[in-house]
Amino acid sequence: MNVLAVGCHPDDLEIGCGGTLAKLASQGHQVTMVHVANGNKGHKLIPPDELIQIRKLEAQAAGQLIGAEVISLDVPDLAVKSDQDELIGKLVKVIRKVKPDYIITHPPEDYMKDHMEVSRAVFDASFAATVPYYNSQEDEDAHHKVAPIYYMDTLAGVGFLPTEYVDISDYIDTKIKMNDSHQSQIKWLYEHDGIDFLDFVRTVSKFRGLQCGKAYAEGFKQAQAWPRLTTERLLP
């Protein structure tokens, strides 16, 4: 299968569904990781232009751990707008290229607006990608179906009750390594805010595991909208 994961910032996918993506890749599925925002405002000391390049390299390193393709849409932090045709067009181009069997992204409600805007943009773009005359180009065929969407966990799992779980017990170490690739964030949070973010990520995964009887797990909800529903179990 082709699986497209769309997060807002570099590291959001690693936090929310890194174990699932690692599991999918190990099973031979093609995984594409997209971050919409470039993370340019995610540090108090590193200037935005320098931080963009650092975070892009960190995202590439994380994706390489599982053999995933990593794509940046290069939207500035706090400037993600789901009603912008330019963003929808960028997402449509990626969806038509990847032809995903399903998409993983943020839930409609999360702790910050950029995440929620990405959720809406992915929902809209995944439909637009199937419309032949929307941004049509000779080298770009419309996707043949409106892809099912699975919403990954919120940060810290706040306000999110999964309806599906993925056992990532064998992939928790890979998930932690993927997150550890984002040193510009990990070091900053630890040194300046006292947050051990790798422990944070492991703890949430253990909590979701407790809910479904596994050592570690990730939780998801499927978007409940026609024609995205299916009788198949698509998550690994």
Image (cartoon, helix red, strand yellow):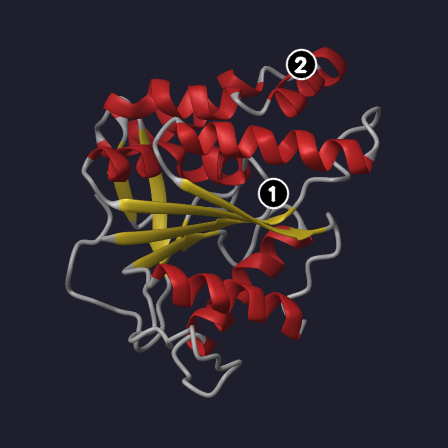
Asked if one can make out residue 161 in the rendered structure from this viewpoint, the answer is no
User: Residue sitting at 74 percent across and 50 percent down?
Assistant: 76
> Label 1 amino acid?
His
Quarter-wise, where is residue 96 in the image? bottom left
Give x and y (percent) for residue 222. 34, 58
Residue at the front extreme of this rendering: 138
Q: Which residue is mark 1?
A: 9
User: Residue sitting at 18 percent across and 37 percent down?
Assistant: 27
Asked if one can make out residue 157 in the rendered structure from this viewpoint, the answer is yes
Along the viewing direction, whichever of 28 and 179 lies nearer the viewer = 28
Q: Which residue is mark 2?
A: 190
Q: Is residue 141 left or right of residue 159?
A: left
User: Residue sitting at 15 percent across and 65 percent down?
Assistant: 231
Dot 2 falls on a residue whose secondary structure is: helix
Give x and y (percent) for residue 66. 34, 31
**Circles 1, 2 touching at the beta carbon (< 8 Å):** no
Labelled disc at residue 65: none
Please, is residue 137 above or below residue 73 in the view?
Answer: below
Along the viewing direction, whichever of 208 and 146 lies nearer the viewer = 146
Q: Is residue 230 left or right of residue 137?
A: left
Q: Is residue 222 left or right of residue 115?
A: left
Give x and y (percent) for residue 124. 50, 72
User: Residue sitting at 50 percent across and 83 percent down?
Assistant: 134
Separation (CA) of disc 1 from disc 2: 19 Å
Mark 1 or mark 2: which comes first in sequence?
A: 1
